[in-house]
Amino acid sequence: MKKITSVIILILVVGLAFVGWFVYANNQESQKIESTGGSFENQWVKFNYPPDLTIGDASTNDHVDITIYNGTKEIGSINDYNSNIDEMGTSSKTKITMINGRDALVGYVGSVNFNLLETSAFVALTDNSILEIEIFSSNKPIFDKIMNTIVIKKGKINTTKTYSNHGIIFNYPAKWGVEDYSNEDNIIGNLSSDSLIVVGDEDGTQIQIQIMPTSEKSDQEAIKETQSSMNVDGTKISNITLKIDNNMAYGGIYRVNDLDSDEIIRTEELSFVKNGKVYDLIIQAPNSKFDKEKANFDMILKTFKIH
């Protein structure tokens, strides 16, 4: 009886081994299994990894499909999904960062209905797709080696959008929003505004654009009246001039105390006249963030056109 039982157990063990081999063999047929000595590259990504691991690559021109093996055991993957990174679940432990100039979430990301791994990351691949990188075994040294060396070769993020209305056009950061108050009654001081457009981020970083008639005044009189009416409430640091759409703009730099946030707000005001209208631009951000946002402000000012 013991002999029969031993034979049955042996058959089961052999059968399970065969099933495991069959699954692995099928994966090998669909994937190109590589042991590349610790450095992997395909049309989508390249990265370094511990050289004792192997990489399975079934990526196509349209999708990323990479599997990471330790022997025959699958321990991680890199795949793309149709989703927006802003829609991904996070936790208080998630690190919000940038990878290859792309928005990324690292560690404990995904749906709250699943176990969130420390060794997981989502990176924006395009505006509507993400790259997911996971090491299932929570092996942080493997995960860190990949994340510290990964280069994303394909996928394009639209980093800018274009505003075009009220006779003006300019580019602005894709993550910023635009509020157009031009259909409302906009009274600034004793002046009526034809248009009021605010483009900016949620943290108060913004450019406010006012368009007002000169009311047959000279250019300098119209600019002076406009800036006097706007009355930026702060300490003036210096005067500035800048060419905007080949028009000389005049204004100043101010330090403003924000009583609500107890922060110093750096504010720059620039005004110029074209085609019988005054264009008044008020640029502002928390003083600690202004230099970081300067490239975004410059993009708007350099692409600002009147048509």
Image: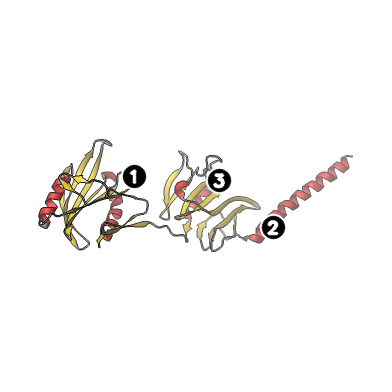
For marks 1 and 2 on the same chain, the one whose residue lies earlier in the sequence: 2
Protein image colouring: secondary structure
The mark closer to the camera, 3 or 2, is 2
**What type is the residue that disc 1 sits on?**
Glu
Q: Label 3 to label 2, Cα distance in Å? A: 25 Å
For marks 3 and 2 on the same chain, the one whose residue lies earlier in the sequence: 2
Provide residue 259's location: percent of width, then percent of height.
Answer: 24, 35
Provide residue 104's location: percent of width, then percent of height.
Answer: 44, 50
Q: Is residue 299 placed above or below 92 in the rendered structure? A: below
**What type is the residue that disc 2 sits on?**
Ala
- Picture quarter with the N terminus: top right
Q: Is residue 59 placed above or below 2 in the rendered structure? A: below
Front in this rendered view, residue 183 or 101: 183
Lateral position of residue 79 relative to residue 275, left or right: right
- For disc 3, the marked residue is 139
The mark closer to the camera, 1 or 2, is 1
Q: Is residue 194 visible?
A: yes
- For disc 1, the marked residue is 202
For this orientation, the residue located farthest to the right is 1
Front in this rendered view, residue 61 or 47: 61
- For disc 2, the marked residue is 25
Q: Secondary structure at mark 1?
A: loop
Q: Residues within 10 Å of mark 1 (few under 14, many from 20)?
A: few
Q: Residues within 10 Å of mark 2 (few under 14, many from 20)?
A: few
Residue 218 position by quadrant: bottom left
Lateral position of residue 80 relative to residue 11, left or right: left
Look at 57% across and 52% down and name the residue there: 77
Provide residue 207's location: percent of width, then percent of height.
Answer: 26, 50
Q: Label 3 to label 1, Cα distance in Å? A: 36 Å
